Each structure stands twice: as C-alpha cells, then as structure tokens.
C-alpha cells in the first residue's frame, strides 16, 4: 500500500471522482520553473491495493481500491516495480533540485537585503566584495540546477536545458511505457544524479 494525498473539489450531488493514478509532483521552484515541453506529471501508481479516504466535516470514510494492470500488458510485476523505483528516484531528484534552487533564491534575497543595510556604512566596504563573490558563486550553481534566464516556455528555445528539466524529462520517459528501465535510462539517471 502507498499513500497518495490529493485534494479534490467535489461538487454537490457528485457521486464519482476520477484519479489519474499519478502521485503528486514536487513543489515547483519559487516564481515558477519553465519546462520547454511540459511540467512533470507525477509517477504512475503501481497495480495493487490502496485505500481511498474521504474526509467530510471531520469524519473520515475509507474504501478499498484495487488498481489493476492493463489486461493487454505482458509486463511482469517485477519490471513494473523496477520502473516505479527508478521513476521515484528521479522525481525525488527533481524535488531536491527545486529545493536547492529555492534555497539559492532565498540566499540572493538575503544578500540583496544585506547590501542595502551595509550601503553607506564606511566600515562595511570590505564586506561588499565577499558578498558579491558569494552571490556570483550561488548563481553559477543555480544556473546548473535550472534555467533561470528563461521565464516562459518560449524563452527556453533560446537557452540550454538545465538539470531539473533533464531529470524531469528522463523520469517522464522512464514512466511512459510499461517495462523495466532500459540500460540507457539507468546510465542517464546515474549521470544526472551524480551531477545533482
């Protein structure tokens, strides 16, 4: 059993809820991170037994749910589990990438505020070059983790794809079909995780 928490808006009188069988995606980078194809979609749930919980006015209702594989699929459960594990590892890497970028963005904001506080203070002049150097070093790391220069999907056509997009696209490809991840996918995952 796995835990998936999705918040649903249920209209009065509605008796059916559709779940796309995908786990939630990690939070996006503050201010948005652009993906030139599509944003991550979330990992597809494995066939198995789940529990659906609905909480209304403080009362929780639970119902069993069984997700079955496509009957036309000839893929083994072991292959599906291998696919799921690699996809999960990659989605966790996207989350770590986004978290690191958010920390860098917070650092940029704090350094900007520190510059303002030190402006006009003659005793602080020696600190300003160190602050600028730290800000530059943080920007170098930030620009490896995600494409900070592009603010829209169209702008990404003018800039190279960076690590968060590469990992997210690989996760999407791993999770796209039914089957164990290919050797190439595993090698790409090792490379991207090493870079991260």
Image (cartoon, rainbow, N blue to C red):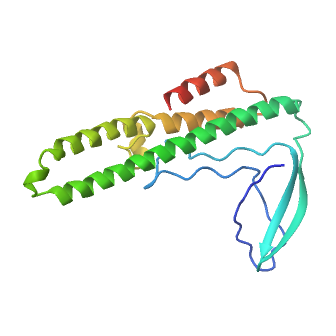
Residue situated furthest left in the rendering = 122
Q: Is residue 34 above or below residue 12?
A: above
Q: Position of residue 160 (x, y in %)?
A: 41, 33
Q: Nearer the viewer, residue 102 or 123?
A: 123
Residue 107 visible (yes or no): yes
Left or right: where 92 falls relative to 10: left
x 26%, y 54%: residue: 112
Left or right: where 83 falls relative to 188: right
Res 91 → quadrant? top right
- Tally the numbered discs: 0
Res 187 → quadrant? top right
Q: Is residue 148 above or below residue 167?
A: below
x 77%, y 57%: residue: 19
Q: Nearer the viewer, residue 9 or 6?
A: 6
Q: Position of residue 133 (x, y in %)?
A: 24, 38
Left or right: where 122 falls relative to 166: left
Q: Nearer the viewer, residue 112 or 159?
A: 112
x 71%, y 61%: residue: 6
């Amino acid at each position: 059993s796995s835990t998936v928490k999705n918040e649903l808006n249920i209209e009065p009188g509605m008796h059916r809820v559709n779940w796309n069988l995908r786990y939630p995606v990690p939070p996006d980078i503050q201010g948005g991170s652009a993906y030139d194809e599509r944003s991550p979609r979330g990992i597809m749930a494995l066939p198995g037994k789940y529990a659906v919980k609905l909480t209304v006015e403080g009362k929780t209702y639970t119902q069993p749910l069984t997700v079955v594989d496509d009957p036309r699929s000839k893929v083994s459960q072991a292959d599906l589990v291998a696919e799921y594990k690699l996809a999960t590892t990659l989605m966790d890497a996207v989350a770590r990438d986004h978290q690191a970028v958010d920390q860098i963005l917070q650092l940029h904001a704090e350094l900007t505020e520190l510059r303002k506080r030190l402006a006009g203070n003659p005793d602080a002049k020696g600190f300003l070059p160190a602050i600028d150097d730290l800000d530059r070093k943080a920007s170098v790391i930030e620009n490896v983790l995600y494409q900070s220069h592009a603010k829209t999907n169209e702008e990404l056509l003018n800039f190279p794809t960076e690590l968060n997009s590469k990992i997210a696209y690989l996760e999407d490809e791993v999770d796209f079909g039914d089957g164990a991840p290919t050797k190439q996918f595993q090698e790409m995952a090792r490379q991207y995780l090493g870079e991260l």
